[in-house]
């Protein structure tokens, strides 16, 4: 789609504002022109009211002056001055209204573009985000839309300026067509000179667009990857990289400003030269009309002097428009839907699963890739049962999970829910019936209440706390000073990995999903957190259709069936005992994992013994300190009351420390 059509689409939505701004701007121009015509005659009349020079003035001036003949000679100057003052006031009022409408129009169009952008980003396929950089999207949404809207405002301004130029041209022609032809020829040469700088503006605008995109991308990567950057001590490299982009953008901006700044002085100097040549030409043209020369030439030069800045404005607006061409193209590409993937929506509202899910010879390759990720998958997931997917990385486990909520559709084959093709179901109702808990839990920078109840309305605190208990999250929530109102930071930065997972499970429990998808939900957790999360998962999966993806085979041994994937194909299917008996892929994976886990268990036991010995030593030390302090106080061996108070406080601290050591020891013993 032509980028200008995108601009036209948003402009026509508010055509009344556009037309009003242009019409009122043109009215302001008329006031400006009339005022310009009357200034010189007013000055001449002020010097000598009886002067006959005005009798030889151009017809347009005579017609305007005839309006004041109804007034006496004594009051005529006053009324002419009052008329010019009124015209000046009306010009500024209409100019203000026109500019205000232009500003309001640009703001409302920016709002429309951003709302449409958010709608598009919510509706577009997941694959769009896989192929796009978040920083690039953010840059388009913020700065590029601003520049594109500025371009629309410049177009409207250009229409008003051109209308003004034609009005001044008509006035100049009515005063002297000979001088106007000469002015046009000289102005044409000036316009050609301006063209060079206008072309340079487009070049600088493209550089600004590219460098702004790179700068935004790198800044977002820096913010999201700050832990890694600090962990490897790579701050200097990141600083150098982003500084280069900042400097490149600022240089392009400075070059663009310098280029635009040259246009004004160039036009002013050119205008002075044009005026000087016109004075010389006027002297020869009106040599035989010396009486009319002063009026004609002064009026013409005054109007021309008022008109010359318009040439500069036209070139300035053209320069800005060409500088924003790249932004308009970027925004047009961002807003059009034809070049983006969208999932087709079905018409059947999803209710509940009655029998099960059937993957019928499903094949899949990612968009723009030829290689098949899934090859002839034939799989049955009965209602209310847990099916586990295991296999090496890249075997296709997560891809199968992504097909169920229709983040992607199969390249070939079908996925059937109770015999109905998955593509026939309404997307919103289908996804609302699913709960997804993944390894990388996303949490909003909001309260615990908001994150647990996300997507649901009219949920009471009692319900939230109930699911928090079932998800083993209540204990840590109850210890927080603000409870459910606690703000958890960006992506839940104030919580541990296990706490995040338990919140995700609580969120899924509250939704009571018909189908549950667990994508390596415990793979990144320590042993204690994994135990707590696994207990919560067991509660969540009870009598629920569940698809589990796991690397740790210990978490899926209770599954109804375990599906072993290898290079996109189903290699084995069966329960834990059956697959071990087969001695195939699963048995091999099991042997590898549990041989490693035995070594890890041995090391953990050794570490635990050392820890218990340390805790025992700390407990004896604290107890001895406590008993010694209490003995000093009880036997009145200390007379100083202040010293006695300090010993009592030290005793209290020792008792608290001892209590914490006992709690730590008890906790270690239960592991």
Image (tube, helix red, strand yellow):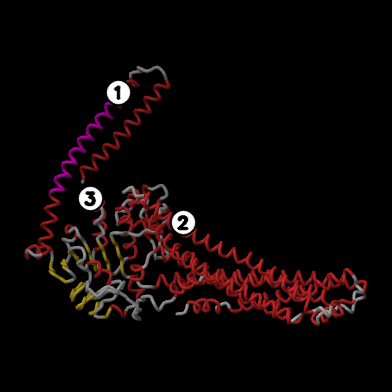
Q: Nearer the viewer, residue 628 or 128?
A: 128
CA gap between label 3 and label 2 equals 48 Å
Mark 1 neighbour class, 10 Å CA radius: few under 14, some 14 to 19, many 20 or more: few
Q: Position of residue 522 (x, y in %)?
A: 25, 57
> What element does badge 3 sit on?
helix
SS state under label 1: helix
Verify whether residue 602 appears in magenta: yes
Where does residue 622 sit, x and y in percent of width and height? Answer: 28, 30
Left/right placement of residue 379 relative to residue 330 reads left
- The correct choice, above or below, for 649 with respect to 426 in the image is above
How many marks the image carries: the answer is 3
* Residue depicted at 16% across the width and 43% down the height: 605
Residue occupied by mark 1: 628
Classed neighbour count for the residue bearing mark 3: other residues with Cα under 10 Å, few (<14), some (14–19), many (≥20): few
Q: Is residue 425 left or right of residue 248?
A: left
| Quarter occupied by the N terminus | bottom left
Q: Which residue is mark 2?
A: 247
Residue 611: tell me if it is visible.
Answer: yes
**Viewed as shown, does residue 180 lie left or right of 649?**
right
| Residue topped by disc 3 | 527
Residue 454 location in percent, x, y? 39, 63
Q: Position of residue 296 (x, y in %)?
A: 80, 76
Image quadrant assignment for residue 330: bottom left
Left or right, 4 with reference to 351: right
Residue 153 visible, this angle: no
Please tell me which residue is depicted at 61% across the width and 78% down the height of the picture. 16
Mark closer to the chain start, 1 or 2: 2
Disc 2 element = helix
Q: Magenta part of the protein: which range?
A: 599-625
């Amino acid at each position: 789609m032509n980028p200008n059509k995108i601009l036209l689409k948003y402009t026509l939505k508010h055509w009344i504002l556009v037309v009003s701004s242009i019409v009122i701007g043109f009215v302001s121009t008329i006031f400006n022109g009339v005022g310009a015509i009357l200034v010189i005659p007013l000055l001449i009349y002020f010097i000598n009211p009886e002067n006959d020079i005005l009798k030889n003035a151009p017809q347009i001036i005579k017609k305007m002056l005839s309006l004041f003949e109804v007034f006496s000679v004594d009051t005529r100057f006053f009324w002419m001055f009052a008329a010019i003052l009124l015209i000046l006031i009306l010009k500024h009022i209409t100019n203000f209204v026109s500019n205000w409408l232009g500003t309001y129009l640009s703001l409302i169009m920016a709002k429309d573009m951003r709302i449409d952008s958010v709608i598009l980003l919510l509706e577009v396929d997941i694959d769009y985000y896989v192929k796009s950089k978040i920083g690039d999207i953010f840059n388009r949404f913020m700065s590029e839309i601003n520049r594109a809207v500025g371009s629309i405002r410049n177009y409207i301004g250009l229409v008003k300026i051109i209308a003004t130029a034609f009005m001044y041209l008509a006035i100049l022609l009515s005063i002297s067509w000979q001088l106007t032809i000469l002015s046009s020829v000289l102005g044409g040469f000036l316009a050609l000179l301006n063209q060079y700088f206008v072309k340079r503006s487009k070049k600088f605008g493209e550089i600004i667009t590219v460098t702004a995109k790179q700068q935004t991308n790198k800044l977002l990567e820096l913010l999201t990857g700050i832990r890694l950057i600090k962990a490897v001590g790579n701050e200097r490299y990141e600083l150098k990289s982003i500084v280069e982009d900042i400097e490149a953008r600022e240089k392009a901006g400075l070059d663009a400003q310098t280029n635009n700044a040259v246009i004004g002085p160039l036009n002013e100097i050119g205008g002075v030269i044009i005026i000087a040549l016109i004075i010389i030409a006027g002297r020869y043209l009106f040599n035989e009309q010396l009486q009319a020369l002063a009026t004609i030439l002064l009026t013409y030069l005054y109007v021309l002097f008022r008109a010359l800045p318009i040439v500069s404005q036209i070139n300035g607006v053209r320069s800005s428009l060409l500088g924003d061409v790249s932004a308009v193209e970027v925004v047009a590409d961002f807003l059009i839907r034809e070049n983006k993937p969208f999932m087709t929506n079905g018409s059947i509202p999803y209710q509940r699963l009655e029998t099960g899910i059937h993957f019928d010879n499903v094949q899949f390759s990612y968009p723009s890739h030829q290689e098949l990720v899934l090859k002839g998958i034939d799989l049955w997931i009965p209602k209310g049962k847990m099916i586990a997917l295991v296999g090496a990385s890249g075997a296709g486990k997560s891809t199968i999970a992504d097909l169920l909520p229709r983040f992607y559709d199969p390249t070939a084959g079908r996925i059937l829910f109770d015999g109905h093709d998955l593509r026939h179901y309404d997307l919103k109702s289908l996804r609302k019936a699913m709960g997804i808990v993944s390894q990388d839990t996303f949490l909003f920078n909001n309260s615990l209440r908001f994150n647990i109840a996300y997507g649901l309305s009219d949920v009471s605190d009692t319900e939230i706390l109930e699911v928090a208990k079932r998800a083993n999250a209540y204990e840590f929530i109850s210890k927080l000073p603000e409870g459910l109102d606690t703000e958890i930071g960006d992506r839940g930065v104030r919580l541990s990995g296990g706490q995040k997972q338990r919140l995700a499970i609580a969120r899924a429990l509250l939704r009571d999903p018909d189908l549950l998808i667990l994508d390596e939900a415990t793979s990144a957790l320590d042993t204690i957190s994994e135990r707590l999360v696994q207990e919560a998962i067991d509660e969540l999966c009870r009598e629920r259709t569940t698809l589990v993806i796991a690397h740790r085979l210990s978490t899926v041994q209770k599954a109804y069936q375990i599906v072993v994937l290898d290079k996109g194909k189903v290699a084995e299917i069966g329960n834990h005992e059956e697959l071990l008996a087969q001695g195939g892929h699963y048995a091999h994976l099991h042997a590898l994992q549990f041989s490693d886990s035995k070594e890890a268990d041995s090391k953990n036991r050794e570490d635990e013994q050392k820890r218990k010995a340390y805790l025992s030593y700390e407990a004896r030390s604290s107890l001895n300190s406590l008993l010694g302090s209490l003995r000093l106080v009880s036997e009145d061996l200390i007379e100083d009351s202040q010293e006695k108070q300090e010993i009592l406080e030290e005793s209290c601290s020792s008792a608290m420390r001892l209590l914490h050591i006992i709690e730590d020891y008890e906790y270690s013993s239960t592991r």
